[in-house]
Image: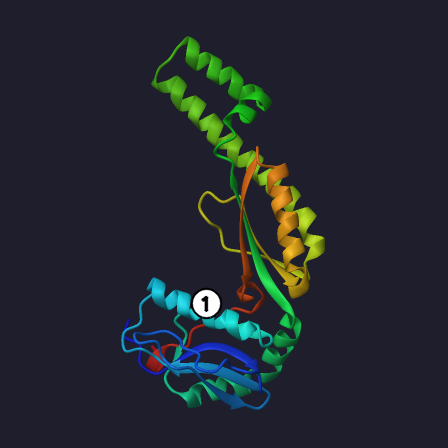
Amino acid sequence: MVAEGVYVYAVLRAGTVVPSGSRGVGSPPALVRRITQGRLDAVVSDAPPQLRARRRDLLAHQDLLMRLAEEGPVLPMRFGTVAPDEATVLTQLAAAESQHVATLDQLAGRIEINVKALPAQDALPALVAEEASVRRLREAARRNPGYEASLRLGEAIAAALSRRAAAAGQRILRELTPGAGAVAAGPEVPGCALNMSFLVDHGDADSFLARARRLAEAHRDHVELRLAGPLPCYSFVSSEAARPVPVGGE
């Protein structure tokens, strides 16, 4: 994809400080700037002539959003959001001003924490001890080893691991939800029993993460929890608000 135009990182309340010397995507990293429309600012830079989802640029995009979030609420754009020119960005800001202001008010003082629950792959002893059907299949495979017996045992183990992870994930979700201002389901991830994001007050982030880690330890025979955060609040911004702007109307 060839990207020429204006790269858009975020929408902020008008007047929010953009850290001096902030840099964005590209090589060399582009100098970011702020453009204003009514009650809103957009943080933008010149788009690099060839934009790819390189690790360097992904990290630059994420790092800038986190730095901006230290100054106030941020409506984050997805990586690769490019407009033909500044006038297009300003027009969109004017059209969605009320919606964006309301979203920024909701996100003020909050961050996102993502929780993924995966089957606990190192919990086979606990699985065998607790699942009678798996024990029977394992004993049968030992008595009469062979491809079919091994296949049935493997399928039973995989199914039990997934079922146990899903049940534990739901228990953890119920425990964590009261500590969040909002909860949003993420996209399905292969092999993942649960993918949820939590909108958490900034001051509560450490205690929320500590609680999640305690729950992970308590359910370690059933599930592996992967925690990510603090993050920009992608999951609590409407897809319309954060959609990429195609270059040249493509």
Between 164 and 61, the residue placed more toward the observer is 61
SS at circle 1? helix
In the picture as drawn, the residue positioned furthest to the top comes out as 143
* Quadrant where the image shows the N terminus: bottom left
Question: In this rendering, is residue 47 above or below 225?
Answer: below
Question: Which three-letter amino acid code belongs to the residue tagged 1?
Answer: Gln
Question: In this rendering, is residue 82 above or below 225?
Answer: below
Task: Please tell me which residue is depicted at 44% across the width and 28% down the height of the picture.
Answer: 155
Task: Please tell me which residue is depicted at 37% across the width and 77% down the height of the picture.
Answer: 246
Question: In this rendering, is residue 206 above or below 157?
Answer: below
Where does label 1 land, which residue?
62
Q: Can residue 242 be seen by looking at this rendering?
A: no
* Image location of residue 25, percent across then percent down: 37, 73
* Image location of residue 198, percent across then percent down: 61, 58
* Quadrant where the image shows the C terminus: bottom left
* Image location of residue 184, percent across then percent down: 60, 58
Task: Please tell me which residue is depicted at 47% across the width and 17% down the height of the picture.
Answer: 138
